[in-house]
Amino acid sequence: MIPKRPYGKKGDQISIIGLGGIVLARLPQREADAIAREAYERGVNYFDVAPTYWDAEERMGAAIKPFRDKLFLACKTAKRDAKGAQEELEASLRKLQTDYFDLYQLHALSNMEELEQCFAPGGAMEVFLKAREQGKVRYIGFSAHAEEVALEALKRFPFDSVLFPFNFVMLFKGNFGWELLREAPKRGATLLALKAMARTQWQEGAQRLEKCWYEPITDPKMAELAFRYTLSLPNMTAAIPPGEENLFRMALPFAERFRKVSAREMQRLRAEAEKLTPLFSRAA
């Protein structure tokens, strides 16, 4: 079975691999049901979705209904105002056929202005706090693709977790993510990873994948090494593979046979990173 690691401060344990709802988007319901069921039966209990993933909420809601109470279900809102966040929260609960989310997140914080909007009077955080009081939300987190914004968010509020791109190319070549890796645990925030299997930006003229805005690693051996690297980072709890169905299924065995990367494997990843352009970088 897939290993689990601690999440938060209430005794939760979540699988080291998460099912991103975008995997289920735009699939026939029967197919979505089969993928969700397979993931669950193989030990995945961490499911993450968002309203921006096309029809993923509807697909996931129907698919997980038989075992919703066995899952750690995470959802998000990209709304920064209270009215919009409230409407989206209620819509997501309805579409996912659930009374509560284990984790509700500010989705893709990208700049300081957005962060200010969330915390201002009439901002989205008012909805998050009220929803937690009402039992509609157990934990509060956020996702981000800007390290400075993520660090500032952790200073503003005791978030339970941060969902962020942690990837060998970005860390080794882009100096992106190191400070957050150190700071989040100090503030009691669980680390969750995006982009573990990212390679680089799509090249001009490349045949792009519909559900992946970056070029993923498709070579199974290198993909496994990249995935294991992210999960070997200190205090890392879980990682969500790319949104393509075949890449998620490819990653399931990576989690089942997970072991920490060796020094030799680390050298190989460093050498590979030197050949690539990271999706995100940060000045040293």
Image (tube, rainbow, N blue to C red):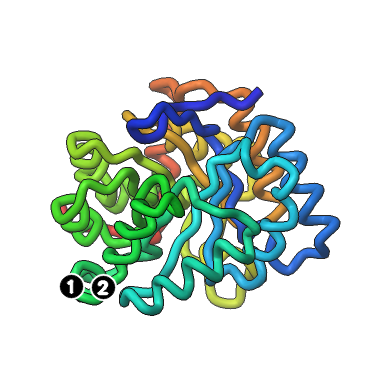
Quarter location, residue 145: bottom left
User: x, y (%) of residue 265?
Assistant: 46, 27
Q: Nearer the viewer, residue 178 or 219?
A: 178
SS at circle 2: loop
Specify few, some or many for label 1: CA neighbours under 10 Å numbering under 14, 14-19, or 20 or more.
some
User: x, y (%) of residue 171?
Assistant: 32, 45
Q: Nearer the viewer, residue 218 or 183?
A: 183
Q: Which mark is residue 123?
A: 2
Instruction: Tell me, yes or no, if residue 274 can be seen here.
Output: no
- Above or below, 117 against 68 in this view is below
Disc 1 and disc 2: Cα gap in Å? Answer: 5 Å
Residue under the image location 27 percent in, 48 percent down: 159
* In the displayed structure image, the side of residue 121 where residue 253 appears, left or right: right
Q: Which residue is mark 1?
A: 120
State the residue lying farthest toward the front.
Answer: 134
Residue under the image location 71 percent in, 49 percent down: 65
SS at circle 1: loop
The quadrant of the picture occupied by the N terminus is top right
Q: Is label 1 in contact with label 2 (beta carbons under 8 Å)?
A: yes
Q: Which mark is residue 259?
A: none
Specify few, some or many for label 2: CA neighbours under 10 Å numbering under 14, 14-19, or 20 or more.
many
User: x, y (%) of residue 204?
Assistant: 54, 76
Specify the amino acid type for callout 1. Ala
- Above or below, 245 against 179 in this view is below
Instruction: Tell me, yes or no, if residue 270 can be seen here.
Output: yes
User: x, y (%) of residue 278?
Assistant: 38, 57
Q: Nearer the viewer, residue 94 or 229?
A: 94
- Above or below, 156 against 213 in this view is above
